[in-house]
Amino acid sequence: MYMVDLIRKKRNGGELSAAEIRHLVQGYAKGEIPDYQMSAWAMAVYFQGMTSRETADLTLEMVRSGDEVDLSAIQGRKVDKHSTGGVGDTTTLILAPLVAAAGVTVAKLSGRGLGHTGGTIDKLESFSGFSTSLSKEEFVHQVNRIGVAVTGQTADITPADKQLYGLRDVTATVDSIPLIASSIMSKKIAAGADAIVLDVKTGKGAFMKDKKQAIRLAQTMVDIGNHVGRRTVAVISDMNQPLGFAVGNALEVREAIETLKGEGPQDLTELCLTLGAQMVVLSGKATSPLEARKILEQKMRDGTALEKFCQLIASQGGDAKAVMEPDHFLPKAKYQEEVSSPKTGYISALEAEKIGLAAMHLGAGRETKEAAIDYAVGLVLNKKVGDSVHFGETVAVLHANDKHKLQAAKDQLLKAVTYATDPVASPDLIQGEVTEDGVFRQP
């Protein structure tokens, strides 16, 4: 079997067999297939695509290239959640304790942030002493004891995907739906969950800017999950503006705590309840999303969700007092500066990517993997799309530890805000839901 034949076959629109896909993935992982040939194959896939069966086979070979997490020692049906990333996306911090409070087993592997997109692990490390490096034994024991654990991803999961992703990044083949879907789903499958809920973002602050492309990606990932025996559903959510009001690690943690108490922003609460309801249904703890949502709302009202978050933080060495008294125990920035509106009218756009970059200027994000982040800094919006605003009214508050960084962040933030003279409707947060039966709630 020669790689040049596989490149030619895919270039001409042919369908690779499972054995051929195994040859190219395992050969590349072992260093037997050079970068230039894998690049040519990736470009052929970019233009010709892959069938559902090919994409599922590619995903499984990515999984087999490294370690697979065995969660069989954990009691109950394990349900995982994945977001394709965005600005102010604090959902894991809320969903993990919330659905665990409802009896769902949550054994979560999460990552760090890069660029303007925040990482769950970084946010959790806002808690003094919190450990994101649990051994397998510690991880399993904690989930069996309190129903939830969140730890960092290991370096040995899907190494072939890491190699291929690095290659795609420098060959203009990142935005290929089969390659994106197999990359995401290989990590989720290797992480050992029984069922998966996907939050696929769409809009200017998301990787998938176009809604139709986001739905295609969601359908592809749902097909992969169900093909390999992992029940999978996807929610398409808007990321034209940040989710919630806070952008920045400790600031987002504060907002997550408020949401667990039932006092968070409407959009963040709605998305968490939508995703959480799907997780509860897939776990078998409810028969419908409506029933599941009522359970989750009750867990917010009666304090059980917040109590579970305290348990999670304390079990991993963090200071749980910060959950109950975040203003006293979470990191706080030295300086707060209000950003005033230069106009009177209505907010017609809050470009999420630019707002994320403003927070990154303050030190809330990383420009490189090695860069350090400042947990205290970021920004808090006072307005969302559709809100009215008067000249001089505060549209956001910047939180900084370095005064010299404030002006650049302020300039970036003001570029992100667009105004209209006439009233503007708020965007639909939930753009659609994808299951093995099709696409639903698609406006």
Image (cartoon, helix red, strand yellow):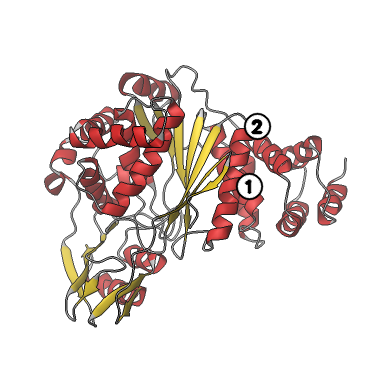
Give the camera-side residue of 193 and 190.
193
Amino acid type of the residue tagged 1 in the rendering: Gln
Instruction: Give the crowd class for mark 2: few <14, some 14-19, many >=20 residues within 10 Å.
Output: some
- The residues tagged by marks 1 and 2 sit, at their Cα atoms, a distance apart of 14 Å
> Residue at coordinates 40% horizontally, 58% vertically from top-left?
366
Q: How many labels does the image show?
A: 2
Q: In the picture provided, is 210 more to the left or to the right than 290?
A: right
Q: Which residue corresponds to mark 1?
A: 163
Q: Which residue corresponds to mark 2?
A: 64
> Does residue 30 appear anywhere in the picture?
no
Q: In this view, does 205 lie above or below 1?
A: below
Closer to the chain start, of discs 1 and 2, is 2
Expressed as whole percent of the image width and height from the top left, the position of residue 183 reads 59, 45
Expressed as whole percent of the image width and height from the top left, the position of residue 401 reads 22, 62
> Residue at coordinates 27% horizontally, 75% vertically from top-left?
346
Which of label 1 and label 2 is nearer to you?
Answer: 2
In the rendered image, the quadrant that contains the N terminus is top right
Q: Is residue 126 above or below residue 382?
A: above
Instruction: Give the crowd class for mark 1: few <14, some 14-19, many >=20 residues within 10 Å.
Output: few
Q: In this view, does 128 lie above or below 84?
A: above
Q: In the picture provided, is 271 more to the left or to the right than 179?
A: left
Judged from the image, the secondary structure of the residue bearing numbered disc 2 is helix
Amino acid type of the residue tagged 2 in the rendering: Arg
Expressed as whole percent of the image width and height from the top left, the position of residue 68 reads 57, 28
Give the camera-side residue of 19 and 166.
19
Expressed as whole percent of the image width and height from the top left, the position of residue 54 reads 73, 42
